[in-house]
Image: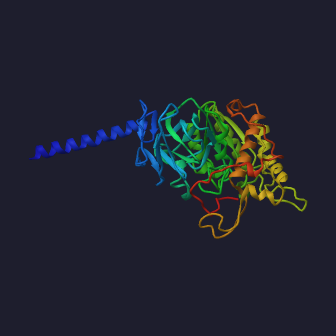
C-alpha cells in the first residue's frame, strides 16, 4: 500500500515537472507564429480563433473580443477584426522583440494603429487598399522589475500592474484593422535606446495623458528598440534611489544609448547641497560616467518648458537655471545635447496662448467617462502635444552626430515654430482613461 502511494506521488510530481518544463520551453521560445481567423492555418503557424483568451501563454486580453472573417482567393484566406480596440498578449521573457504583422483584406480597405505595452505608439494609421496584403515590422522592448539576486526596481504604487512591468508582451490594435497573421521573434542585435526621465517622458497609461517617450518608437525602423524607464514625479536622485539606473546599467550594452531628461521635479529639492549647479549637475555626471563605463552613449535632453506666458504672449522660463545647467554639463562632458526646452518654447509661442492648450491636458468636464471636473494642466501633454515633442526629439537626433539617426523613418523635417495642424493628427483613443494627474509638475 505504501509503495503504491509513493509511485502515485512520484508520477504526479513527474507530471507537474514535465508541465513546468513545457511552459518554461514556451517562455524561452524565440519565435511565435500566429495565424488569425477561422480558416486553415498556414504551415508552421498556430491558429488563433476569437475564442482564444489570454491565460498564461497567449491570446486576446482584457476581455476584448474580435470577429473572424474567412476569404477565398490569392489575397488572403482570413483575418480578424473588431469594432472596438482589442488587445493581444503573449508571455515572453525580458528583451527586445521584432513583431511582424500581416495586414489587409481581399475585399475591403483597412487602417491600423498599433500601440504596445502602456500605449507606446508603434504603427500609425497603416492602410491597405482592397485586395492588398501588407507586412509591417517594428521592435518592442519588454522588461521586468527584477535586476539580480532578488533585487528589484522599487516601483511606485501607481506602477503596480502597469503593462510596462509585467511578464508579457501586449499589443493594442485600433482602427479598421484586418489582422491576418503575427510573428513574434526575440532579437538580440538591436540598438536599445533607454529613456530616463519624469512624467514628460514616461509611457502614460491612460487617456488623455501622453509623453514624448511613448511616441518616439513610431519614428524608428527595426534596428532600434526604445526602452522607456521614465516614471512620473522622479528626479535624477529618485531615479537612482529607486534602482532604475541600476536596472538600466544591468542590461545596457556597448553601442546602446541613454537619453536623460530631468528638471521639473529636481527644482523642488531645497536641501543645502541641492540646486542646478550642485546635486543636479553632480548626478548628471554620475549618469554619464556610468553609461560610458558600459560602452554606451549618453545624451542629455533639456526639460520641456511649462505652458506659461507673459503679458506679451511669450513663453516664460519657469525652470530657473536647470536647463542652463544641463547645457553646461553637456558641454563640459562632451555629451550630445537635444535642447527640448528651447524647442518647446518655440512650439508654444507659435501656437499662442489659447491654442497651445490643445497640446496639453485641457478638457472641459465630461469630455471622458467619469470625468466630472475640468482638466487644466500646463505641464502634462495630450497625445497631440506628445507627438509634436517626439518630432522635436527626432529633429535633435537628425542634427546630431549620433549614428542612431540612420534608423529614423523617412519623414519631412519638422520645425517647432511651424507645428502640425491639430486637425491633421489622428489618434485613436485607447479604452482606459483617468482624471488623476500624474505625479510631478
Relative depth, front residue between 368 and 110: 110
Colour setting: rainbow
Which residue is located at x 77 percent, y 46 percent?
A: 340
Q: Is residue 160 above or below residue 373?
A: above
Most distant residue in the left direction: 1
Q: Is any atom of residue 271 visible in this view?
A: no
Residue nearest the viewer, comparing 37 with 216: 37
Q: Residue at x 61, y 48 (%)?
A: 240
- Residue depicted at x 88% and y 59%: 313
Q: Left of 421 or right of it: where is 439?
A: left
Residue 343, position as x, y percentages in the image: 80, 46
Q: Position of residue 202 (x, y in %)?
A: 64, 50
> In the visual, does 374 lie left or right of 277?
left
Question: Eyeballing the image, is 8 above or below 270?
Answer: above
Residue 355 relative to residue 296: left or right: right
Give percent across and percent down for residue 348: 81, 53
Question: Is residue 90 shown to the viewer in this render?
Answer: yes
Quarter placement of the C terminus: bottom right
How many badges with numbers are in the image?
0
Q: Check the image and name the residue furthest to the right.
A: 312
Which residue, as the protein is rendered here, is positioned at the far bottom? 372
Amino acid at each position: 500500500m505504501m509503495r503504491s502511494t509513493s509511485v502515485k506521488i512520484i508520477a504526479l510530481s513527474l507530471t507537474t515537472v514535465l508541465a513546468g518544463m513545457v511552459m518554461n520551453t514556451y517562455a524561452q521560445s524565440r519565435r511565435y507564429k500566429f495565424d488569425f481567423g477561422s480558416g486553415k492555418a498556414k504551415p508552421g503557424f498556430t491558429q488563433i480563433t476569437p475564442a482564444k483568451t489570454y491565460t498564461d501563454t497567449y491570446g486576446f486580453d482584457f476581455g476584448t473580443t474580435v470577429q473572424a472573417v474567412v476569404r477565398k482567393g490569392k489575397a488572403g484566406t482570413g483575418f480578424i477584426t473588431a469594432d472596438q480596440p482589442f488587445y493581444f498578449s503573449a508571455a515572453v521573457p525580458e528583451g527586445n522583440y521584432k513583431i511582424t504583422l500581416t495586414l489587409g483584406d481581399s475585399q475591403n480597405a483597412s487602417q491600423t494603429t498599433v500601440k504596445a505595452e502602456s500605449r507606446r505608439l508603434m504603427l500609425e494609421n497603416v492602410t491597405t487598399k482592397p485586395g492588398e496584403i501588407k507586412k509591417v515590422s517594428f521592435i518592442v522592448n519588454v522588461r521586468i522589475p527584477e535586476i539580480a539576486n532578488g533585487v528589484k526596481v522599487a516601483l511606485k504604487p501607481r506602477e503596480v500592474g502597469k503593462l510596462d512591468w509585467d511578464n508579457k508582451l501586449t499589443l493594442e490594435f485600433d482602427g479598421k484593422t484586418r489582422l491576418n497573421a503575427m510573428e513574434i521573434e526575440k532579437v538580440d542585435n538591436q540598438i536599445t535606446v533607454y529613456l530616463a526621465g519624469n512624467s514628460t517622458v514616461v509611457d502614460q497609461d491612460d487617456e488623455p495623458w501622453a509623453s514624448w517617450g511613448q511616441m518616439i518608437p513610431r519614428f524608428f525602423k527595426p534596428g532600434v528598440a526604445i526602452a522607456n524607464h521614465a516614471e512620473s514625479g522622479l528626479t535624477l536622485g529618485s531615479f537612482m534611489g529607486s534602482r532604475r539606473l541600476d536596472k538600466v546599467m544591468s542590461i545596457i550594452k556597448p553601442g546602446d544609448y541613454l537619453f536623460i531628461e530631468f528638471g521639473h521635479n529636481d527644482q523642488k529639492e531645497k536641501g543645502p547641497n541641492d540646486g542646478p549647479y550642485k546635486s543636479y549637475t553632480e548626478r548628471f555626471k554620475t549618469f554619464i560616467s556610468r553609461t560610458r563605463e558600459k560602452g554606451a552613449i549618453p545624451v542629455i535632453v533639456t526639460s520641456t518648458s511649462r505652458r506659461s506666458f507673459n503679458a506679451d504672449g511669450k513663453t516664460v522660463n519657469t525652470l530657473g537655471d536647470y536647463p542652463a545647467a544641463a547645457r553646461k554639463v553637456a558641454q563640459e562632458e562632451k555629451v550630445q545635447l537635444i535642447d527640448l526646452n528651447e524647442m518647446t518654447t518655440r512650439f508654444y509661442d507659435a501656437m499662442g496662448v489659447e491654442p497651445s492648450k490643445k497640446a496639453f491636458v485641457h478638457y472641459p468636464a465630461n469630455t471622458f467617462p467619469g470625468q466630472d471636473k475640468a482638466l487644466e494642466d500646463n505641464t502634462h501633454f495630450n497625445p497631440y502635444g506628445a507627438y509634436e515633442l517626439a518630432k522635436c526629439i527626432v529633429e535633435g537626433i537628425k542634427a546630431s552626430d549620433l549614428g542612431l539617426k540612420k534608423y529614423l523613418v523617412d519623414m519631412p523635417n519638422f520645425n517647432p515654430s511651424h507645428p502640425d495642424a491639430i486637425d491633421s493628427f489622428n489618434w485613436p483613443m485607447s479604452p482606459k482613461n483617468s482624471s488623476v494627474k500624474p505625479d510631478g509638475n
